[in-house]
Image (tube, grey):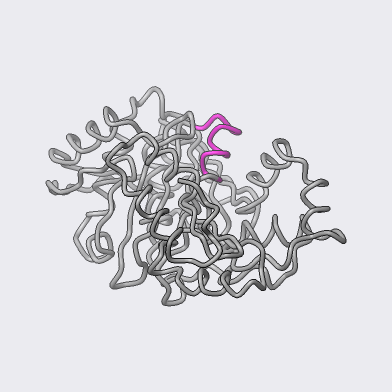
Amino acid sequence: MEEGPLPLLTFATAPYHDQKPGTSGLRKKTYYFEAKPYYLENFIQSIFFSIDLKDRQGSSLVVGGDGRYFNKSAIETIVQMAAANGIGRLVIGQNGILSTPAVSCIIRKIKAIGGIILTASHNPGGPNGDFGIKFNISNGGPAPEAITDKIFQISKTIEEYAICPDLKVDLGVLGKQQFDLETSLSPSQALEIVDSVEAYATMLRNIFDFNALKELLSGPNRPKDPYRFVGPYVKKILCEELGAPANSAVNCVPLEDFGGHHPDPNLTYAADLVETMKSGEHDFGAAFDGDGVGQSCRWECGLLLPGPRRLMSDCKDPSSDLRSELNYWKTLLEGNSSVEI
């Protein structure tokens, strides 16, 4: 508990006219958020102003990101602004890490008003890379156009933002903290740092038969080694819980610049995975984008299959290049003559 209530301050600002988010949020070069005065604060305040005061007063909010550069600094600012805008409870992934599916899961689990996710998905990270902010609503899904347009309209006329600059939190320490605030909106704020994986893993346990999956991956008839599963989620679930070999998780430590790799699991940036799968040493491989939403699967022959979200999107779009992409791989890779498109 902090000694004495923490003061809330309001600062004047000037609007930017380029903060139009899509369903994937607002994505810009990192320096926009890091170096442009109040660029981050303006957009976060616009999100809060888009929610009626009576709805956000005392409400819960989930915050996390893909661990890219500027992730922790942005979360510190969001924590301070959430307190000054009446948010009563914040749930944050340890070290600021939460995949987009995990944020969605926690929003629904705790009945939060929504979640702020810091990611530019498959765009590169680092000081010279990209940064992004997206807002998911209370059903766990991305904010619809009516809400993103409301946020944009507010961002073009915003004149001030509210913040609690003395509120400090250690994102690396699991547990709950309580802060007293100098406000009647929500006189205290509860803040909880949670394991980045556990809530999502629990949801998966309730959906899938983990015992059967463990038998598949670690039993006597298990496939040849899976290869290149990325991220702490797969390391925890696939290796620790389901018994896959520890070396199945490659590039699984979150890094601010993704270790110099490009976080887009496509033919160009996951070419080494495709080549490795063609060797026949492994039965199955998968690569993920930065926030764990987009993924591609590779089978022993090297055939690339887009992840479920891409498949659903492309199946709805008759102009999609999915069919030509699959046909390309069908003719290029040996042993794929039986694949029908």
* Residue extending furthest toward the right: 220
> What secondary structure is the stretch in magenta mostly built from?
helix
Residue 33 vertical placement versus 79 (above, below): below
Q: Residue furthest front?
A: 337
Q: Say above or below: 113 vs 46.
A: above
Vertical arrangement, residue 7 with respect to residue 122, above or below: above
Q: Assess whether residue 103 is covered by the magenta stretch.
A: yes
Quarter holding residue 183? top left
Residue 302 locus on image (x, y percent) = 53, 65
Q: Could you say where residue 12 lies in the image, as x and y percent from the top left? A: 18, 47
* 341 magenta-colored: no
Identify which residue is drawn at 36% across, 34% down: 316
Range of magenta residues: 102-112
Most foreground residue, 84 or 257: 257
Left of 297 or right of it: where is 238?
Answer: right
- Viewed as shown, does residue 48 lie left or right of 226? left
